[in-house]
Image (cartoon, rainbow, N blue to C red):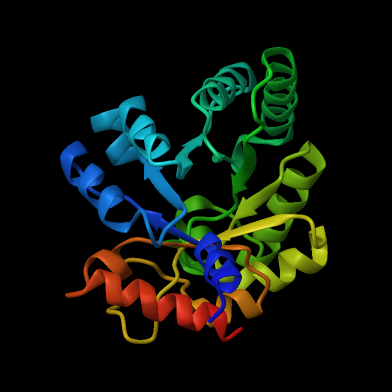
Amino acid sequence: MKDDDVIQNRKKLILALDVPEYDHAVELIERFRDVIDVFKVGLELYTVAGPAIISEIHKREKKVFLDLKFHDIPNTVAKAGIAAARLGVFMFNVHASGGLDMMRKCSEEVINACLRENLNKPRMIAVTVLTSMSQETLKHEIGVQHSLNTHVRHFAGLALKAGLDGVVASAREAAMIRTHCGRGFLIVTPGIRPSWAQPDDQARTMTPKQALNQGADFLVMGRAILNQSDPMKAIELIHKEIASV
């Protein structure tokens, strides 16, 4: 495999640092810095470590996907988005269920702050429907009567209308989103499980190859890698699978 191909493959895989300790996260960043370009910092780790863990990732010249799923009144989410931009993250997300005004205000305010303060604009994406949710959960617990696919498609369209860069969605909906929102719209897919990995609480999963074939731009993987006896070997196998697409 050519060096350029290796670099491109590495950019598609985001390693989720879904661990509860700062020191453990730093150990993982250091361990995988040569094979991973983007690390995801989620609620658990950010609550424990705060901006310090973002600094550790940036010290190693790697990128951060800040996965805090902002969902609040428009003004609060916009301010949170500006704070994320000031931290220098590569990408952050909001919940599409917060509505069009929330997403639009966040997008506009972050863009304005970046222009005013000469900041790199982060990619702003919206969570459609969590990959742990099934059609039954959506209908009987959340109260959404139309289909899961319709719900995802609607939220993706709202995110596009609001000026966001893309969405977080299951790879099972990626082809539909790509058709609806176009080629420049980012699709970030969690719930990615190689055929050789054990299943977990994700309800709507796909393999890396399947996800990319459906139109995904980024694959978010954590436990499917870190729970393996040899995580480095797992990453190597995933990179090879990505290269086969």
171 vs 34, left or right, is right
When asked about the image quadrant of residue 16, the answer is: bottom left
The picture places residue 113, in percent across and down from the top left corner, at 68, 17
Whether residue 175 sits left or right of residue 58 in the image: it is right
Seen at 46% across and 39% down, the residue is 66
Q: On screen, 74 above or below 242?
A: above
Confirm whether residue 94 shows in the render.
yes
Image position, residue 141 (x, y; %) = 45, 54
Reply above or below: 133 against 72. Answer: below
**Figure check: 119 above or below 95:** above
Residue at image location 66% in from the left, 76% down from the top: 214
Residue placed most toward the observer, 213 or 180: 213
Q: How many marks?
A: 0
Image-quadrant location for residue 55 = top left
The quadrant in which the C terminus is found is bottom right
Q: Which residue lies most toward the front here?
A: 3
Nearest to the observer: residue 242 or residue 152: 242
Please tell me which residue lies in front, 44 or 204.
44
Q: Quadrant of residue 200?
A: bottom left
Q: Position of residue 175 (x, y in %)?
A: 71, 73
Which residue ends up furthest to the top in the rendered image? 116
* Image location (x, y in percent) of residue 150: 70, 63
Res 18 visible: no
- For the point 42% across and 70% down, the residue is 203
**Which residue is pictured at 74% across the width and 30% down the height?**
104
Q: Is residue 103 left or right of residue 56?
A: right
